[in-house]
């Protein structure tokens, strides 16, 4: 029986990464995380960056076999241009005290690098045991600051993508696949 695929929304160009490819890659990343943290003594604190990371986080943690705690933060980057200028502001902090813990930041996409650079620096200043990053997508062509990513899902070209948590003005965030937008005229 052939799979029934609903038609793409008119403002989307094509599917870049389908559901099966996402599921396979996320379970591979979880296996890498399970291996890396297998000997830690207290739970790993995963900190998701809202809103974009919420679906990646939900899928990732269901494959984890190590002790872990899920937490979230919200940041404002003053829009994409603001993020490019390095303007990042914390809107909602973690509930957990990160001091003395191994922390894994869970983020939707690495673009300029400003968001992750800000968070890694801020979390290290809190006396964490370690701060690493799991990022679902990477746009290497757009990097402005070097950021060390330990667990990376997929590299993509410099196009605006939506779905699997990522949005365009809050649209298409809950699509189960990653799609490329047709740029607005
Ligand atoms: P940064 O430039 O690495 O700080 O990333 C800033 C933020 O821009 C990311 O966390 C995403 O929320 C957002 N972003 C960057 N590229 C895209 C995209 O293609 N689709 C949706 N959101 C994006
Ligand atoms: Mg984001």
Image (tube, grey):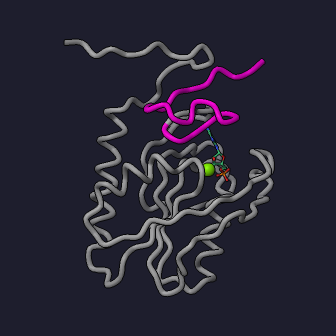
Residue at 36% across / 32% down in the picture?
Answer: 19
Q: Quadrant of residue 20?
A: top left
Total tally of numbered discs in the picture: 0
Tell me where residue 111 appears, x and y as whole percent: 63, 47
Residue at 63% across / 18% down in the picture?
Answer: 11
* The C terminus, quarter of image: top right
- In the figure, 100 relative to 108: above or below? below
- In the figure, 10 relative to 33: above or below? above
- In the figure, 38 relative to 87: above or below? below
Which SS does the magenta portion mostly show? loop
* The N terminus, quarter of image: top left
Confirm whether the magenta stretch covers residue 138: no
Please state which of residues 132 and 60 is positioned toward the viewer in this rendering.
60
- In the figure, 80 relative to 50: above or below? above
Confirm whether the magenta stretch covers residue 170: yes
Please state which of residues 11 and 92 is positioned toward the viewer in this rendering.
92
Tell me where residue 13 appears, x and y as whole percent: 56, 18
Residue at 65% across / 44% down in the picture?
Answer: 142
The span picked out in magenta is: 164-185
Tell me where residue 140 appears, x and y as whole percent: 57, 45
Residue at 47% across / 78% down in the picture?
Answer: 130
Q: Outermost residue, front direction?
A: 95
């Amino acid at each position: 029986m052939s799979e029934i695929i609903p038609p793409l929304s008119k403002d989307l160009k094509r599917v870049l990464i389908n559901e099966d490819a996402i599921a396979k890659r996320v379970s591979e990343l979880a296996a890498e995380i399970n291996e890396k943290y297998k000997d830690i003594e207290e739970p790993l604190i995963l900190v998701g960056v809202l809103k974009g990371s919420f679906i990646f986080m939900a899928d990732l943690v269901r494959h984890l076999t190590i002790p872990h705690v899920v937490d979230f933060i919200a940041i404002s980057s003053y829009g994409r241009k603001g993020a490019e200028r390095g303007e990042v502001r914390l809107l909602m902090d973690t509930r957990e005290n990160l001091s003395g813990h191994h922390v894994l930041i869970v983020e939707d996409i690495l673009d300029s690098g400003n968001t992750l650079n800000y968070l890694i620096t801020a979390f290290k200043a809190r006396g964490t045991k370690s701060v690493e990053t799991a990022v679902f997508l990477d746009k290497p062509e757009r990097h402005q600051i070097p950021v060390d990513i330990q667990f990376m899902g997929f590299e993509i070209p410099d196009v605006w993508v939506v779905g699997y948590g990522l949005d365009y003005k809050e649209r298409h965030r809950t699509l189960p696949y990653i799609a490329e937008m047709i740029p607005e005229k």
